Amino acid sequence: KNIVILISGRGSNMEAIVKACAGEQWPARIAAVISNRPDAAGLAFAAAHGVPTVVVDHKAFADREAFDAELARQIDAFAPDLVVLAGFMRILTPGFTRHYEGRMLNIHPSLLPAFTGLHTHQRALQAGCQFAGATVHFVTAELDHGPIVAQAVAAVQPGDDEAALAARVLKLEHRMYPAAVRWFVEGQLGIADGRVRQLGGQA
Ligand code: GRF
């Protein structure tokens, strides 16, 4: 199976997936890592691990449609079975999400459906939540919605600030996201009638 991973920055989830794919000998390969930002730190890790990298700079396009069209062209050149959004910070057009329906995953740093959008940990702390976490979901047209595949929960601790909570959740992301991607490439995960169909597998 071919996996294409989209990043915008640090790329630590991408790194966890690249390592798990090689280390656990998945029936898959990371065909490419694509970034919308030329300065994304994760590009160096991918290149150092022999993964082809591509930059599609959103600033070079007049609108979202033009950007998404070129992004899809670049992605499809790698014939992906699965597209993995890993800290990819662009809102996607409905046409783009439809094109990858049932074969595009995202990780979002909250317990969805709470706290879609940005600054999730800060908002969870402000709301007095006692638990925070992250969600892996299939991507649909609506931002941070779509069928939920897996969630990881972290307890908020006294004195937590945004950075402390984010770091605790990120550690869980690095276990959960590779596990979810592995389910997909092993044929254990899909969607049917807009709902997750999971045939087995444990995080
Ligand atoms: C993660 O917290 C992820 O949940 C969110 O953006 C962050 C990306 O971090 N979508 P990284 O680029 O994977 O290190």
Image (spheres, helix red, strand yellow):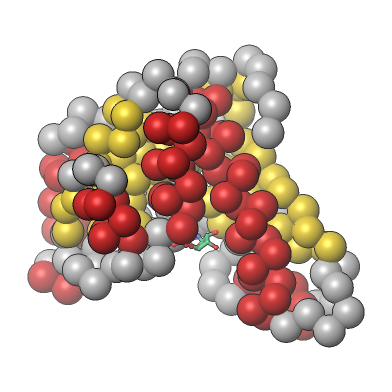
Q: Position of residue 123 (x, y in %)?
A: 69, 77
Q: Position of residue 98 (x, y in %)?
A: 35, 38
Q: Position of residue 176 (x, y in %)?
A: 62, 43
Total count of labels: 0
Whether residue 65 is visible here, answered yes or no, is no
In the rendered image, the vertical position of residue 57 relative to residue 105, given as above or below = below
16 or 121, which lies in front? 16
Q: Residue at x 61, y 21 (%)?
A: 197
**If the image is split into quadrants, where does the C terminus sit?**
top right
**If the image is split into quadrants, where does the N terminus sit?**
top left
Residue 59 lies in quadrant: bottom left
In the rendered structure, the answer to whether residue 203 lies left or right of residue 29 reads right
79 or 178, which lies in front? 178
Q: Residue at x 12, y 67 (%)?
A: 61
Residue 73 lies in quadrant: top left
In the rendered structure, the answer to whether residue 49 lies left or right of residue 145 reads left
Whether residue 77 is visible here, answered yes or no, is yes
In the rendered structure, the answer to whether residue 134 lies left or right of residue 99 reads right
Residue 112 lies in quadrant: bottom right
In the rendered image, the vertical position of residue 166 relative to residue 108, given as above or below = below
Q: Residue at x 13, y 35 (%)?
A: 77
Q: Position of residue 19 (x, y in %)?
A: 44, 41
Q: Residue at x 44, y 23 (%)?
A: 26
In the rendered image, the vertical position of residue 105 relative to residue 193, given as above or below = below
